[in-house]
Image (spheres, grey):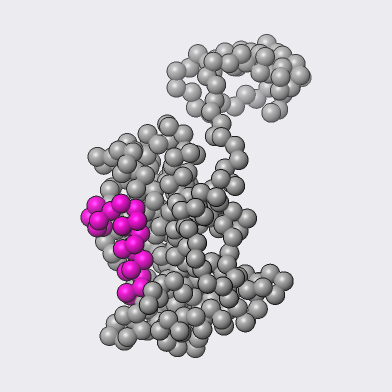
Amino acid sequence: MESYKNLWAKKQETNGNFEWMPLYIHLSDSKNVSAMLWEHWLSDSQKNIVINSIENGDEFLAKNLVMFLGASHDLGKATPAFQIKKGFANSDDLDMILKEKLEQADFFEISYTHLSSINKSHHSLASEYLLYKYGVKEDIGAIVGAHHGKPVDTFTIIKNQAAYEANYYQEEKNTNPIYKKWEQVQKDIFDWALQASGFKSVSDLPEINQVGQVILTGLLIMADWIASNTKYFPLFSIYDSIDCNLEKRAEEGFTKWFKTELWQADYNFDYKESFNKRFGFYPNKHQERFIETILDINDPGIFIFEAPMFIPHTRG
């Protein structure tokens, strides 16, 4: 039995209707959205920065890494610490039904499990820790761990997760059958994430420097945000069997979100006419001098023009 299909990633109750998002579907959605963001959302210059940030990198390898990040980012939800958590806005009945599904998949006594340190293993932290256990290096693990916006302050925080074994395996003893059950399910998801992203083993994952990490963290956050939006990727009734084409689901969801093409700057523009079009008048002599100065610089950064008192200026 494919036990991982009974793990939930999201759940909600709407007008008495119980809905959920299986974890494996959310990971598939996130993987596919990550790939489409790479293809259709990142600019060429951003792609080149990422490619150049990867050791021996090329676009194929970079895109595969992007997909792996999407496929593995919520691995930490495949833990008892996450699976027994109450929903924020649903009745106890929905929580109970999802636990019963896990019981039926041989996650025995999950309904009665209480973890004293459950809040020590947020799922983003848990994801990074599990990747670390599987041999994924810190550069990639840090991206996954930061997918809610903030990386850990020190890698010691990741290593210290070893003190909370029950959060990951329901029991402390690694000889316990339920410990082995969780261990196997997590490894199955990790192996799928590798293979679905074009990697045969963890040793095939590339190294990426900090510059590339920053861009891919932003891309992963975007992918997770899009794949978590139920307008684009709807939840399923808890009572219905799930049979859907995941590739088609991803294409339809992404298309709903991607309504406009990425804006590209026009490097050959008439700034005076642009001013007039936007504000209804042409720039004054101070604004002209400021713009001309910027245009004469080969590698401009951020400029701030603070107009002295009594000089007309435009905020925009």
Q: Report the quarter where the N terminus lies.
A: bottom left
Q: Position of residue 246 (x, y in %)?
A: 47, 57
**In the drawing, does residue 38 fall left or right of residue 265?**
left
Q: Report the quarter where the C terminus lies.
A: top right
Residue at 54 percent across and 15 percent down: it is: 268
Rendered image quadrant of residue 106: bottom left
* Residue 218 in the image: above or below residue 281: below
Residue at 70 percent across and 27 percent down: it is: 315
Residue 230 visible in image: yes
Q: How many marks?
A: 0
Residue at 50 percent across and 62 percent down: it is: 244
Q: Position of residue 53 (x, y in %)?
A: 33, 39
Q: Position of residue 55 (x, y in %)?
A: 26, 42
* Residue 213 in the image: above or below residue 89: above
Residue farthest along the top direction in this orientation: 285
Q: Specify the principal SS of the magenta part.
A: helix
Q: Is residue 112 magenta?
A: no
Q: Nearer the viewer, residue 77 or 101?
A: 101
**In the drawing, does residue 297 fall left or right of residue 286?**
left
Residue at 40 percent across and 57 percent down: it is: 71
**In the drawing, does residue 139 fall left or right of residue 43?**
left
Residue 220 visible in image: no
Q: Nearer the viewer, residue 157 or 242?
A: 242
Q: Position of residue 126 (x, y in %)?
A: 41, 67
Please state the extent of the stretch shown in magenta in the rendering.
183-204
* Residue 175 in the image: above or below residue 309: below
Q: Is residue 195 magenta?
A: yes
